[in-house]
Image (spheres, rainbow, N blue to C red):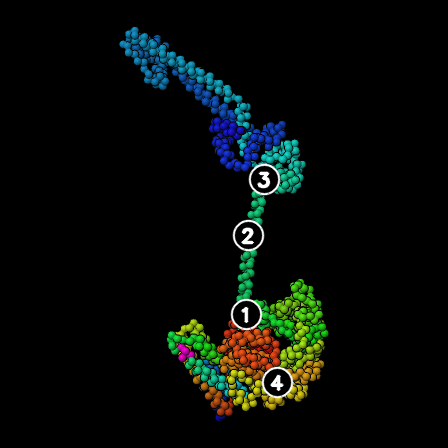
Amino acid sequence: MNTIVVAQLQRQFQDYMVSLYQQGYLDNQFTELRKLQDEGSPDFVAEVVSLFFDDCAKLINDMSISLERPDHVDFKQVDSGVHQLKGSSSSVGARRVKNVCIAFKECCDVQNREGCLRCLQQVDYEYKMLKTKLQDLFNLEQQILQAGGTIPQVDIN
Amino acid sequence: MVCEMETDQIEEMDVEVLSSMWPEDVGTEADKQFNVEKPAGDLDTLKEVTIEEKPTIADLTRLPDLLNSTHQGTSQLTNLVKQWEYMQDNAVRLLREELKILNRQREEAEAKELKIIEDYKFESNEPENVPVLDETSDLFRKFRQKKRDALVDSKRIEIDEEFDTVAYWKQKALSLEKMLEASTERERRLVEKLHESLKTMESHAAPVQELTQNLNRAEGFLHFILQNAPIVMGHQDKDLRYLFIYNKYPSLREQDILGKTDVEIFHGGGVKESEDFKREVLEKGKASKREITFTTDLFGSKTFLIYVEPVYNKAGEKIGINYMGMEVTDQVVKREKMAKLREDNAVRKAMESELNKTIHITEETMRAKEMLATMSHEIRSPLSGVVGMAEILSTTKLDKEQRQLLNVMISSGDLVLQLINDILDLSKVESGVMKLEATKFRPREVVKHVLQTAAASLKKSLTLEGNITDDVPIEVVGDVLRIRQILTNLISNAIKFTHDGHVGIKLQVISEPSFARDNALNADAEVDNGLTETSVWIRCDVYDTGIGIPENALPCLFKKYMQASADHARKYGGTGLGLAICKQLVELMGGQLTVTSRVNEGSTFTFILPYKVATSDDYSDDQDEFSDMTDHQSEPDDTTEGYFQFKPLLGSIYSNGGPVIGNGFLPHKVMLTTSPIKLINGFVADHSNNTGQSEMVQVENGGYVDETKLETSSGHCPESAHQYENGNGRCFSKESESCSSSQASSEGGTLEMESELTVSSQREEEKAETNLTEPSKPKILLVEDNKINIMVAKSMMKQLGHTMDIANNGVEAINAINRSSYDLVLMDVCMPVLDGLKATRLIRSYEESGNWNAAIEAGVDKEILENEQVCVRSTNRLPIIAMTANTLAESSEECYANGMDSFISKPVTLQKLRECLQQYLH
C-alpha cells in the first residue's frame, strides 16, 4: 500500500521535475544545486531557493521604487539590482528569471524606463511563478519522504 | 645654297614633268620647315648642308655599272628617259598644233590673195555675176564667207563714192591694197613665230642635259631629306662587300669601307649577327628588318634597326643587297624601360592580388579558429556537466555492469573534454593570446610530481623514473604550468605506447644550442656560472621502451590531428593534438622539441628550453619560499634529490579501473572534515549548523604550526592524523565516497603509499617534522557579493573537500589577503565598492611592490592594511581566478589583462570548480 503511494508520488515528482525543465523554468544549474544536497545538508536546495526568493522580493521592491518616478530614475541602482538578480537566478538555475534579467539589463543599459517596468513586472511574475512551482515540488518531496520513500533521481533530457 | 637653287628649279618646272615623283611645293614647304624648326643651337648641322657630297662614299667606277645592271638602277634610268620622252612628245604635240594653226592662217591668207586677184579680175563685174555652176567659185564663195566670218570679221569696205565711177574703183583698189598689206604682214609674223618655235624646240631637244638636271634635282632632294637623317645606307655585293655606303656621320674613310665586309671593318658584338642576317636575306631573297645591337670599339653599344633587301640584276640573279640602318638605341632603351615598368606593374599587381588572397584566407582562418575556440568553450561547459555528473554517479552504489558502462562513459567524456581543452590551448597559442609566466620553480619537484601523478593512474607494470643531473639548478624561472603540461603530455604519451619496461624523464644542463645562438644574439647565455640573471639551457628527455615510431611517421608526428598511423589511433585513442601543443608550447618558450625513435625499442622526446636561473640572493630566503610554495602539498620535496623511481604497484586500487581524479591533491579530499568557513564580512551561512558539526574557526598562521606538529607526530600518515585531529571519523567515509571510486576502494593511509616515492618517503617525513610551516590544507578565498552565489559556491567547495573564506567585495578581499595567506582566490568580476578586476590589479601591485600603496591610493582603508603587517607573507604570485557572468572572449581577455590567471564562467558548477582547483592547487 505504502509502496504504491510512494511509487506514485515518485513518478509524479519525476514528471513534475521534468516539466519544470521542459517549460524552461529551470536549467542545469538547478541540477548542480541538487547535487550539492546530501545528508550533510538535506535542505540545501530549499534553503538556497528560499534565500533566492527573498532576495528577489527585496530587489524587485527596491527596483520598483527606483523606477517609480518617471523623470528621476536611478538607472545605476536598477542596474545593480538587475545584476544581483541575474547572478542569483543564474546560480540557482532559475532559467526564466535569468532570461528576463538579461532583457531587463539591456533595457537598463539604454535607460528605457518603459522597458524596465515591463521587465520588472515580468520578473516579478516569473519568480512568483517559479516560487509556487518549487513549493509544489518541495511539498511533493516532503510527501515522498513522509511516506518513507526516497527522492528519485531525475534524468533530464 | 643648293637647296634654294633646287627649290627654284622645282618651282620653275612644269607640273606634269615631275609631279609623279616630287610633290609640287615640297621645296617651299620644306624650306619653311627648315627655317622654323631648326633649333637655334643646332647650327652645326646647318653647316652640314654645304658638304653635300661628303657623306657619300661610292665606288664611282662601279656605280654606273650598278645602275645599269640592277633593276633599281635600270628602273630609275627608264623613269628618267620616260619623263624626257614624255616631255619631248608634249613639245612636239604643241609644235604640231602651232604648225596647224599657222598652216590654216596661211591658207586663209592665200585664199584672201586669191580673192583679191579675182576681185581685180572681175573688177567690172557685178559681184552677183559669179558663175553658178563654177565649183571653184562656189568653193571660193564659201571660203570667202567663212573667211569673212572667221578672220576678216565683218569689216566691210566702206566706199562712199558712187558705184561704178572711177573714184569708186580707185577707192576700192586702195582699200584692197591695204588689206593685202596687212595680210602680208601677218604672214610674216607667223613665219617669224614658226622660226622661233623651231628654235626653242632645238633648245629642248638636248636629252642628256634634261636628264642631268633631273638627276641633279633628285640627288639634291635626296640630300635635302637625308642630310640630317640618322641613317646609314649601303649596297653590298654578293660577298657582302660594300660597294656603296651613305653615312650621316662617317667615322671611317672610303678606303676603309669599300670593298670590305662588315666583319672586316668592325669587331665586337652584333657584327656577326648582322652579317648573318644579311646573308640570310640574300639567300632567302626576301627583304626583312631586324634589330641588332652592336657593341664595337668604334661607336660603343648601339642598337640599329636594319632593313636589308636583296638586289637582282635584269636576269633575275641576286647580285647583292641594299641595306639601311637606323640607330634606335634611345628608343630601345625607352622601350625596354617601358617593358620593365609594365612587367614590374604586372608583378606588383599579381603580388597584390596574391596578398589580398592571403589576407582573405588568413581572415577566414582566423574566423574559423575563433569560431572553433568559441564553440569549444561553449561545448566544454555542458560536457563538463555530463562528465561531472557521471563521476558523481560513479560514487553511488552501482552493480558491476553499470559501473563498467559508466567508466566507458566517463573515459569517453574525458577524452572529448581533453580534445576541447587541447583545441582551446592550440588556438590560444596560435592566436598569440597564450601568455607565458615567469615563476620560480624547482625542476626536480616538477619532474617528481609529473611522475607521481602518472604513477597514480598507471594501469601497467611500468617503472617510472626521473633522473636529474647535479648541474641542474635547484630553482629556475619559467612557466611551470606549461612545462608541467608538456611533461605530463609526453609522459602520458610514453606510458600509452609502452607495455613493459620503463618510462622516464632525464634532465641535464647543456650548452646553448645552435638554433638559439642564431636566433637570440642578445641573449646572454653564460651557462652554469651562478651569476644573477643568467639563463641556462636544460635538455629534457622523455624516454620509453615502447613500440616506437616508424621513421616515415616522424615528420607528421607534430602535426595537428595526426597520429603515427590510423592503426595506432584506433588502438590507442587520443586526440592527436597533444604533441602539436607540446611543440607549439616549447617553441613559444623559445625552445625546440625533437624526437628520436626506433620501432619496437622505444622513443625519446627531447625538448630543450632556456630558463632564467633564479638569482643567487634568493637562496637566502629560500626556505620561506619553499614553505610557501609547498604549503598545500602533502609531503615536502627534497630539493636536491636527483633520482626518483616509481615501481609498478598493482593493488586493488586498479581493479575498478575508474578514473583517478586529482592525484595531485588526493590528501586534501580525504582530509576534508566539516565546513569550516571563516566569514570575513559578517555573512554567516547557517546551513552548516544544520549538519550538527562543529564549525571550525579560521586558522591563523600560528595555528598552522601547531596543527602540523600534531599531524606529524601522529605517524607516517598525516591525513589520518588530520582526521583524528578534527575528531570526526564519520566524515572520512563520506568524503571518500564523493571522491573517485579508486580512492573509495582503498584506505586513505595506504593510498598515499601506493603513489608514494619509494626512495625518499622517510626523508620527507623528517623534513615535514622540521619544516614547521607545513600547512594542513589550501586556503581559498571567495570574493563574491551575491549571497546565493556564495552559498552555492561554498556548498560546492564543501563537496570538493575544501573550505573557503568569503569576502563580499574587492576591498574586503584585499583586507583578507593582507591578513592571511591564501593559495587561491576566486574573484567575482562585477562587484560593488571595488570590482574584481581592480582588486586583482591592486593585489598584483602589492605582490610586485610589497606594499599596499596602490590600494591605499585607490581608497582602501589604510588603517586596516597598516595594522596587519605581522603575518608572514609570500611573495609568490597568488592564483586569482575570475568568475565572469559573460563567457565572451573579451571578458576573459580583460581578466588576463588585469592579472588574473584564469576564469570560470558563471554559473559555477562542481566540475568547473574541480578543474580549477586541480589546476591551481598542487
Q: Amino acid at mark 1?
A: Leu
Q: N-terminal of the two: label 1 or label 4?
A: 1
Whether the magenta-drawn stretch holds residue B380 is answered as no
Chain at tag 2: B
Q: Which residue is mark 3?
A: B327
Q: Amino acid at mark 4?
A: Gly
Q: N-terminal of the two: label 2 or label 1?
A: 2
Q: Residues within 10 Å of mark 1 (few under 14, many from 20)?
A: some
Q: N-terminal of the two: label 2 or label 3?
A: 3
Whole-number angstrom distance, CA of label 2 to CA of label 1:
40 Å
Proximity of marks 2 and 1: CB atoms separated by less than 8 Å: no
Chain at tag 1: B
The lab-note entry on whether marks 2 and 3 share a chain reads yes
Residue B372, label in figure: 1
Whole-number angstrom distance, CA of label 3 to CA of label 4:
104 Å
Label 3: which secondary element:
strand
Looking at the image, residue B668 sits to the left or right of residue A72; the answer is right
The lab-note entry on whether marks 2 and 1 share a chain reads yes
The lab-note entry on whether marks 1 and 4 share a chain reads yes
Residues rendered magenta in the picture:
A63-67
Most prominent secondary structure in the magenta stretch?
helix
Q: Position of residue B464 (x, y in %)?
A: 69, 77
Q: Position of residue B419 (x, y in %)?
A: 58, 73
Whole-number angstrom distance, CA of label 3 to CA of label 1:
67 Å
- Residue drawn at 28 percent across, 7 percent down: B165
